[in-house]
Structures are given as structure tokens and as C-alpha cells.
Amino acid sequence: MIYYIDCKDKEKISRALKLCGDSADIYSCRILCLIESYKDYDGLISLWIQYGENNYPTAVLIKYCGDMTAVLGENADVDEIREFIALVGASSVLSEEKLFDGSESGIIMRLAGKSSDNYRSNNPDVDFSPDLSAVHKLLTVCSSKSFECPLYEDFILDTSHKLRHGCAECCAVMSGDELLSYAMTAAMTDKSAVIGAVCTRPGYRENGYGSVCVTSLIDRLGNREIFIMREIKENESFYKGLGFENCGEFYIYRPSDS
């Protein structure tokens, strides 16, 4: 059975995540980051736990602005989860299993060791508090089939809120007042982080700015376990050069695309 859970019930949620998965994986990281960011704002996030025999947690699901993330334990009732998602509705579903036909897959990479290359030898300016309006303009310019820039208001509100609450870090490479490259944490806890929104302005690529941006952000994240998510055929050599290695797959389902 699937039950709605108060997001402030940290003990119950932490126990369920520990039993269903690894608290340092990308799915648990996303769930814990959303809870820490929005637990005091009623109605912005919804969280459910699926229980199996002997009241044992078998799955955790969270929904924020239509986007759902699912952590599935070994004994999760996948059929019940599919029916539940169809009932409550979602604009996207992120999970480690292919829950629906039409799901797209991608690669998860984990930072195995920091690159020995000195990307900072001719270091441009690095800014850890860039103007978010300028960031959104860069993300819009860099939008592609594999990366869709979020709406301006959604991006500004969500990113600024997480930054204020210590639930995100971001980094920009600047040339004077011009923003050349950007990266941020799509999710972050005290144990782990998922780096996303990595982009460099067209015309300035292949100059190492993206590497400076990502490695500077990695340094800022300290001892956290760090992940990235990428398209299957994109950016593998770039991230391997920074010390990442492939460690799994993810699936994302968008009902409007199927």
C-alpha cells in the first residue's frame, strides 16, 4: 500500500530511504534536497511511502511542481506504483527502473577522483554568486534537444530559494561582466550532490571554461559524493577527463512525449 507522509517526519523518511536505496544515490539525494528546501512550505511537495509485508518500506516517491522522483526497493510493487502515478499525475517521472513504455534512458556518472590536469593555469574569473537572470539567459542560449531551459520564473524562484537555504551551490566562469560558462547542483545534501545545468556559451567552447566551472564547483562541494546525469551519446569524454566514471542508468518518463 502507498501512504501519504508528512515531509517533516524525518525519521520515517530516512528509514525508508535507507531500506529502499542508498542515501547517497541520485534519487535519494533529490528527495532529501527537496524535503530540506520545502518542508516548511505546505503544498509545494508531496511525499509517499509504499509499504509491503510486515510494514516494510518498499518505495519512496516525491512530487514537486509536477516532477516525480521514485526510489524503488528490491521488493517494490511496481504495478501499484505505475497505477498510483497514473492516478496522481506527473509531468515527468525519474527512476532507476523503466516504469513506463516511452521512457528515455541516460547515464549516471560518479566522481571517482579529481583530475590531475591543471585547468586553472590561465584561470578566468570564477563567481559562486552569479546573477541568476544572466544565468537564465545563458541557459536559454544553450538549450537543445537534450536540455530544455526551465521557465524564467520557475528557475529564479527555485534556484534562489535553494541557495538561501543552503541546498544548492552554483559556479560561473566570467570574462568581465560576460557569463561564459555555468554549472550548479541540481540536488545537494550534506552527503552527496548531483551536478547539472552545465553549459558554455556558443563561440567560447573548447577553451576549457566548462572544465574550470565544473572543477571549481567540485572543489566547493568538499567531501560529498558527486554525480552527474548525461545523455547516452553525449559528453562522456568530457566528464571522464574530469574524473567521473559511469556507474548506472536512469530513466525519465514524460507522458506528453509518449
Image: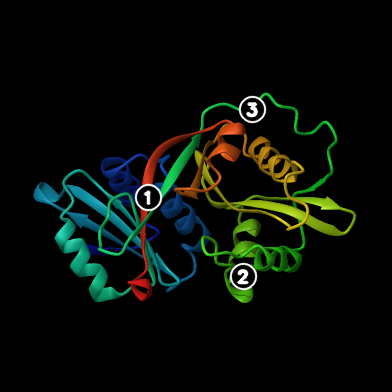
Tag 1: amino acid: Phe
Image quadrant occupied by the N terminus:
bottom left
Question: Quadrant location of residue 246?
Answer: top left
Viewer-closest of 120 and 184? 120
Decide: few, some or many residues near mark 3? Use Cα within 10 Å; few <14, some 14-19, many ≥20: some
Q: Furthest residue to the right? A: 176
Percent position (x, y) of residue 58? 21, 49
Tag 3: amino acid: Ser
Question: Quadrant location of residue 242?
Answer: top right
Residue 48, numbered circle = none
- Classify residue 129 as left or right of residue 66: right
Q: Return the disc, 1 or 2, that comes first in the chain's sequence.
A: 2
Percent position (x, y) of residue 67? 41, 67
Residue 157, numbered circle = 2
Task: Using the image, determine if residue 24 lies above or below residue 81.
Answer: above
- Classify residue 14 as left or right of residue 123: left
Decide: few, some or many residues near mark 1? Use Cα within 10 Å; few <14, some 14-19, many ≥20: many
The local secondary structure at tag 1 comes to strand
The local secondary structure at tag 2 comes to helix
Viewer-closest of 52 and 196? 196
Q: Residue at x 73, y 40 (%)?
A: 212
Given this view, does label 1 or label 2 mark the residue nearer the observer?
A: 1
Residue 250, numbered circle = 1
Q: CA distance from mark 2 to mark 3?
A: 34 Å
Residue at which label 3 appears: 115
Q: CA distance from mark 3 to mark 1?
A: 25 Å
Q: Residue at x 43, y 45 (%)?
A: 107
- Classify residue 84 as left or right of residue 138: left
Q: Residue at x 32, y 46 (%)?
A: 17
Percent position (x, y) of residue 131? 77, 63
Tag 2: amino acid: Leu
